[in-house]
Image: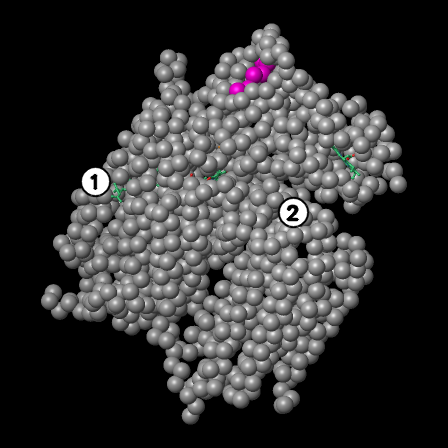
């Protein structure tokens, strides 16, 4: 193995991802009421961001790539927000 | 002019309080739309003639940008829109808040007919008899697909969904007979899922109610059903039974096991009987079986009417029994 | 010279750089559509979980947290091997490229194997909606929706992974023929993006499906 | 003139293989043109049968079930197989690379794949229609579509599902091409508005189509396995289906109209010989429509049982999307102001578009007005609204574009006299068909009815009469355009003296579009001052 800095970075991220996985499983065994899902999704979001930022090289990508990556999630947010605006304000 | 309008009417009869209000908004919209259409068509025609190729018009204006104009035709439509919006939203909201004194009539839709159940027990199919001058609230559900209860003369329409109650209300203002249409496409017989609404004056209406003798009021048949399905083994006069007492339930605030609070309206009661596990009352175990298979929507209406008669909300603290 | 130097750009592009940029942006735009593709499923999940929180919790107890966890680790690991493969391609390390591609394929297959195992358990437990569904717990109707969503979401995810394995195999064949190198590695990179995305989907699926109220 | 017989994209190769396996964007555009024309006539045929049935209040021509299949198949073919691909896949495919000075789209093979997916989807749907039809309406509402309809729902939906990927591929292709392959000097604000419109459309396609794809997939799952994702009897919620459906289908209406708006901008500037008025606002309005269009889908669900508050939000947002449309209409008018207008057929279509789109759009405001919509939703008022925009607007824009670029595409001119005549016939026929429907709708005639109370007959007869004229109106251009392929006058590279890169190359263009990559030094629509309009450039 060579000690190319980016390879070391990849391995470090890999380890962090595994640790986060362990964390998310162990937190799931603690009763935090409604916060379980919040925390689980937060950890998932962090993991996804790590994969995107480092493994998918968003870090070094042009702005356009950022735009599309974020745009997709933003539009998903629109879908969620407006649909839930119906389901959460029923019945009337 | 009036005679022409009676041959080629542009509006359906206005037979409800809402009809008037909605027509007013509609006319306002027609005026706004006509003004804009006129402006645009006139400009198109005028420019087309004036600036046709080879015409001797003054064409000095080489700057195809004008911020002030752009702002004007952004802001003016915005303001007009805001006005329309507020007006229509207000009316719309009112369409969803039925007055307290409204008669509640149950409507069950199925492919392809309308079944109507009056609280007095009268049942009719593809026809609705109602008195003039008294608000009517329809509590509607469907046995199969989505339908929509539409009376053009009242300008009201509401989709009727399976496994759920939706409501619609109107205040008839004019005696007469009107079309009832199913407005949501519901399969082969959609176009024949039509009926007639009879708005009658008070005396005729009372006579009509009485005329169909032998009808048992809904609440009474509901009571029979309550016995028949042995609901009373669990639901008794007080909270000492296995289930909560249903006295004073209707319209009260119920605390659920998961901490939520809900108003016990028709939908809630219906849901409690069809899917007892979904909303469990705090302090009780979810032992009530589902009656989805046994109780059809007509019987459900009767049961609800019966439960409604079980006294006004008396007990302040429902769902506190441990 | 290695084969890859012949990798001329396609006629519609000015040069290989423009082509590379177009390829990679193309994949990103495609992944944007994928976000909404899976996102709509997540919305269904969200709506029904909101409507039937208890049913979803009890139904999720039929999931094997450990197997799911292992699978998550497998996929995270495969993301690592993919990024290493891209790195190898970029630096012209042909042998390592091949090794990492093969490792990725193996990990992908392990994932699918475990997934298949879990599916077979569901069949054995009569928890397959529409085929054989007998559910003893409360609110069977809502639980059935949970299982439908489970199968659809993991099924489509597995399909994506299968396609990913196919692409990786194609890359591995290419790599063994020395097709890629420092000036032509866009296919590896672009396919890598896809693979990572499939991984990200699973990162969300795991807690959504497996980790509902496991403490109970 | 003999020397002009150089090699162009049409005569480089002959034979079916050279077309069916071509990756040349221009040839694929032709393939698309033929296919969507076919589907347009299929859809129009269904429409004619419907209109014939509606001549009388009774159901005497076709049975209820047949009628239901007719409007379902009419809507499905017209929306999915005709209008959505129309301008993007035909004119966009042909013109995007030409207008930005590129040799082809970024991914020519995907482009061809996209056409094949379209055809496969089309064959699925068409076969399903012939062998039994589908009767769910183009909206596929559950639980009717999943648990009650006994028709070929699954193959039809599968066809649309496949078609979705065709759309997505075109969208991705355009986005990358416009981002990465513009000629040197062609900055964003030098792009013609047609390109802006294609770009915005592609963004919508890319963000919205996956949602309909997954929704249709769930629909198939629900129908095949009898499970209850959207079926309330099994715990599902039909409104969730409607949300997902309209999350796609409302933005889809802008997929249909934005490209037409782009075309109209080209036509107006060319025939008024004037720079477009308010270029930046026009470009911004296009993007604003695309973005805001995603926020309003709930306006199709005002009486569906959606929460009242959600309805109020969706209504308010619907008004916001009307504002950029207003900006566009007024800027077109301002472009005509002080222009030097010559009345060629394309301009007539552009005028038709502006007028009819305005009426359609303004009646959209009626529908967005909550209380009014309660009365007119699911009546002919809605039918009139969307035909005004889609037939009066989008199809007119498409025809205008076809006429305008016909010389570029085929190298021949269409016969001007016939073309003007048919534009007039279409305009008259169109209004006669659909204006009475506004009145019918407000009078309360529900849509999707094959029998109706007799008092609605007069207006229905008018509408049917109009539809006949309209049908003839469509046959005229169909005929003379085909005729012009052999008999039309040769066009020359730039018959309209238009600006734009596509006019700098020969007609029809050579296989790789330009002999050498053009370099752009000025903004779009740089029409010379009027005194010099006689100057003909290009030629060589
Ligand atoms: C290309 C297609 C297209 C386009 C562009 C539009 C544009 C608009 N549509 Fe339309 N619509 C459809 C196709 C389209 N629609 C279809 C197919 C349906 C029915 C689907 C079905 O149920 O089968 C439908 C249904 C539909 C409904 C639901 C009706 C119902 O079922 O109850 C509504 C409700 O709000 C609506 C509103 C609008 C609005 C506000 C716009 C706006 O974008 C219009 C904006 C344009 C203008 C406003 C005109 C220009 C502006 C001016 C001249 C300046 C003056 C402006 C102001 C004062 C603001 N449409
Ligand atoms: C792009 C979209 C598009 C287009 C172009 C059209 C075009 C036309 N439409 Fe369409 N229409 C829709 C989209 C469209 N429609 C949609 C989405 C619906 C809703 C469906 C639903 O409810 O689910 C609808 C519904 C609809 C209805 C309402 C049905 C109902 O609710 O009961 C009517 C009724 O008049 C109608 C009429 C017409 C007419 C007369 C045309 C005319 O413009 C057509 C003119 C064209 C021709 C007439 C073709 C000419 C061809 C010939 C003359 C040759 C004959 C053919 C052969 C030999 C094969 N349409
Ligand atoms: Cu019932 Cu339409
Ligand atoms: Cu809409």
In terms of image quadrants, where is residue A12?
bottom right
Report the residue marked by disc 1. Answer: D421
Is D104 left or right of D214, judged from the image as shown? left
Q: Is residue D247 visible?
A: no
| Dominant secondary structure (helix, strand or loop) of the stretch shown in magenta | strand
Identity of the residue drawn at 29% across and 65% down: D20
The residue segment tinted magenta is B127-132
Question: Where does residue B170 sit, x and y in percent of width and height?
Answer: 59, 22
Q: Is D416 drawn above or below residue C91 in the view shown?
A: above
Question: Where does residue D341 sit, x and y in percent of width and height?
Answer: 27, 45
Q: Is residue D481 visible?
A: yes
Is D51 left or right of B249, judged from the image as shown? left
Identity of the residue drawn at 60% across and 29% down: B140
Using the image, tell me which numbered label, if any, was put on residue D355: none
Quarter of the image for the C terminus of chain D: give it.
Answer: bottom left
Quarter of the image for the N terminus of chain D: give it.
Answer: bottom left
Question: Where does residue D448 sit, x and y in percent of width and height?
Answer: 42, 34
Report the residue marked by disc 2. Answer: C141
Q: Chain of mark 1?
A: D
Does the magenta-highlighted stretch encompass residue D482?
Answer: no
Query: Which one is in front in this view, the residue at disc 1 or the one at disc 2?
Result: 2
Q: Is D117 drawn above or below residue B190 in the view shown?
A: below
The crowding category of the residue bearing disc 1, from other C-alpha atoms within 10 Å (few below 14, some 14 to 19, many at least 20), is some
Please, what secondary structure does the residue beneath circle 2 have?
A: helix
Does the magenta-highlighted stretch encompass residue B128?
Answer: yes
Identity of the residue drawn at 78% across and 33% down: B253
């Amino acid at each position: 193995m060579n000690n190319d800095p980016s390879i070391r970075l990849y391995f470090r991220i890999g380890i962090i991802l595994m640790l986060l996985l362990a964390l998310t499983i162990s937190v799931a065994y603690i009763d935090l009421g409604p916060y379980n899902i919040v925390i689980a999704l937060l950890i998932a979001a962090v993991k996804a961001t790590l994969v995107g930022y480092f493994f998918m090289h968003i870090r070094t990508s042009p702005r356009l790539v950022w735009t599309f990556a974020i745009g997709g999630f933003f539009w998903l947010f629109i879908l969620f927000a407006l649909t839930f605006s119906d389901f959460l304000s029923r019945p009337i | 002019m009036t005679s022409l309008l009676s041959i080629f009417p542009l509006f359906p009869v206005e037979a409800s309080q809402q009809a008037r209000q909605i027509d007013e908004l509609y006319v306002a919209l027609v005026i706004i739309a006509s003004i804009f259409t006129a402006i645009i068509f006139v400009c198109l025609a005028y420019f087309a003639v004036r600036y046709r190729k080879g015409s001797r018009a003054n064409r000095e204006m080489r700057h195809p940008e004008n911020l002030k104009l752009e702002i004007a035709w952004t802001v003016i439509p915005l303001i007009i829109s805001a006005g329309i919006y507020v007006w229509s939203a207000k009316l719309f909201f009112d369409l969803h808040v039925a007055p307290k004194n409204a008669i509640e009539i149950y409507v069950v839709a199925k492919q392809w007919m309308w079944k109507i159940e009056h609280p007095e027990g009268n049942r009719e199919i593809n026809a609705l008899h109602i008195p003039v001058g008294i608000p009517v609230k329809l509590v509607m559900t469907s046995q199969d697909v989505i339908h929509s209860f539409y009376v053009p003369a009242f300008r009201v329409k509401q989709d009727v969904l399976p496994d759920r109650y939706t409501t619609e209300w109107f205040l008839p203002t004019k005696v007469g007979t009107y079309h009832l249409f199913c407005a949501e496409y519901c399969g082969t017989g959609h176009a024949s899922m039509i009926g007639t609404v009879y708005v009658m004056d008070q005396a005729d209406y009372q006579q009509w109610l009485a005329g169909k003798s032998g009808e048992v009021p809904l609440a009474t048949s509901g009571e029979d059903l309550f016995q028949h399905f042995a609901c009373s083994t669990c639901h008794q006069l007080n909270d000492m039974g296995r289930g909560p007492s249903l006295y004073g339930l209707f319209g009260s605030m119920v605390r659920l096991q998961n901490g939520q609070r809900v108003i016990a309206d028709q939908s809630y009661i219906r849901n409690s009987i069809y899917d007892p596990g979904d909303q469990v009352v705090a302090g009780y175990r979810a032992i009530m079986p589902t009656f989805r298979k046994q109780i059809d929507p007509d019987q459900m209406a009767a049961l609800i009417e019966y439960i409604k008669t079980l006294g006004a909300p008396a007990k302040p603290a429902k769902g506190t029994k441990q | 010279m290695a084969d890859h130097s012949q990798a001329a750009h396609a006629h519609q592009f000015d040069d290989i750089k423009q082509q590379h940029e177009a390829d990679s942006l193309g994949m990103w735009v495609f992944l944007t559509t994928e976000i909404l593709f899976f996102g709509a499923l997540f919305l269904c999940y969200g709506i029904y979980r909101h409507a039937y929180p208890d049913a979803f919790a009890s139904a999720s107890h039929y999931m094997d947290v450990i197997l799911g966890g292992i699978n998550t680790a497998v996929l995270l690991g495969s993301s690592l091997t993919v990024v290493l493969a891209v790195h190898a391609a970029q630096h012209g390390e042909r042998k390592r490229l091949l090794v990492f591609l093969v490792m990725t394929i193996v990990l992908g297959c392990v994932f699918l194997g475990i997934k298949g195992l879990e599916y077979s358990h569901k069949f054995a437990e009569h928890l397959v909606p529409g085929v054989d569904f007998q559910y003893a717990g409360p609110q069977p109707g809502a639980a059935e929706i949970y299982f439908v969503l489970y199968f659809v979401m993991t099924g489509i995810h597995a399909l994506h992974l299968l396609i990913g394995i196919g692409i990786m195999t194609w890359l591995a064949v290419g790599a063994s023929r020395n097709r890629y190198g420092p000036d032509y590695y866009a296919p590896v990179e672009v396919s890598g993006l896809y693979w990572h995305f499939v991984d990200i989907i699973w990162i969300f699926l795991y807690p959504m499906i497996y980790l509902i109220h496991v403490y109970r | 003139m003999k020397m002009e017989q150089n090699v162009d994209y049409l005569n480089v190769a002959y034979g079916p293989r050279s077309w069916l396996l071509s990756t040349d964007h221009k040839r694929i555009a032709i393939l698309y043109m033929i296919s969507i024309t076919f589907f347009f006539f299929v859809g129009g045929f269904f429409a004619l049968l419907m209109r014939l049935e509606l001549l009388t209040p009774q159901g005497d021509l076709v049975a209820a079930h047949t009628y239901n299949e007719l409007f379902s198949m009419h809507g499905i073919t017209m929306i999915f197989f005709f209008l959505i691909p129309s301008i993007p896949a035909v004119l966009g495919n042909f013109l995007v690379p030409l207008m930005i000075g590129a040799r082809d789209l970024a991914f020519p093979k995907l482009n061809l794949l996209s056409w094949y997916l379209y055809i496969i989807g089309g064959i699925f749907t068409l076969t399903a229609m012939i062998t039994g039809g589908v009767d769910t309406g183009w909206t596929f509402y559950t639980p009717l579509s999943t648990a009650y309809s006994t028709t070929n729902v699954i193959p039809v939906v599968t066809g649309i599902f496949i078609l979705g990927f065709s759309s997505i591929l075109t969208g991705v292709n355009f986005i990358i091409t416009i981002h990465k392959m513009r000629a040197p000097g062609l900055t964003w604000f030098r792009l013609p508005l047609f390109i802006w419109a294609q770009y915005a459309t592609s963004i919508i396609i890319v963000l919205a189509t996956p949602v309909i794809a997954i929704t249709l997939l769930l629909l198939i799952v629900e129908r095949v396995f009898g499970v209850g994702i959207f079926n309330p009897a099994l715990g599902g919620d039909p409104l969730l289906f409607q949300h997902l459906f309209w999350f796609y289908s409302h933005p889809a209406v802008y997929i249909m109209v934005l490209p037409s708006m782009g075309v109209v901008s080209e036509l107006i500037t060319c025939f008024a010989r004037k720079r477009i008025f308010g270029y930046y606002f026009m470009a911004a309005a296009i993007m604003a429509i695309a973005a805001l269009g995603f926020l309003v889908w709930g306006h199709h669900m005002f009486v569906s049982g959606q929460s009242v508050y959600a309805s109020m939000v969706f209504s308010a947002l619907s008004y916001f999307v009307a504002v950029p449309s207003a900006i566009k209409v007024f800027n077109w008018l301002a472009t005509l102001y002080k222009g030097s207008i010559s009345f060629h057929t394309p301009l007539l279509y552009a005028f038709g578009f502006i007028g009819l789109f305005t009426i359609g759009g303004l009646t959209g405001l009626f529908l967005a007005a909550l209380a009014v919509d309660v009365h007119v939703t699911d009546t002919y008022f809605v039918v009139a609204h969307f035909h005004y925009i889609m037939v009066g607007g989008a199809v007119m824009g498409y025809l205008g574009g076809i006429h305008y670029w016909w010389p570029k595409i085929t190298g021949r001119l269409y016969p001007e006299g016939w073309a003007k005549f048919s534009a007039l016939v279409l305009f008259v026929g169109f209004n006669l068909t659909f204006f009475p429907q506004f009145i019918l709708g407000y009078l309360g005639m529900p849509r999707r009815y094959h029998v109706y109370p007799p008092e609605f007959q007069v207006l229905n007869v008018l509408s049917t009469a109009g539809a006949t004229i309209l049908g003839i109106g469509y046959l005229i251009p169909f005929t003379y355009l085909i005729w012009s392929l052999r008999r039309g006058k040769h066009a020359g590279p730039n018959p309209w003296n238009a600006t734009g890169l596509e006019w700098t190359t020969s007609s029809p263009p050579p296989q790789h579009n330009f002999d050498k990559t053009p370099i752009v030094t000025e903004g779009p629509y740089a029409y010379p001052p009027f005194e010099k309009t006689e100057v003909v450039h290009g030629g060589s």
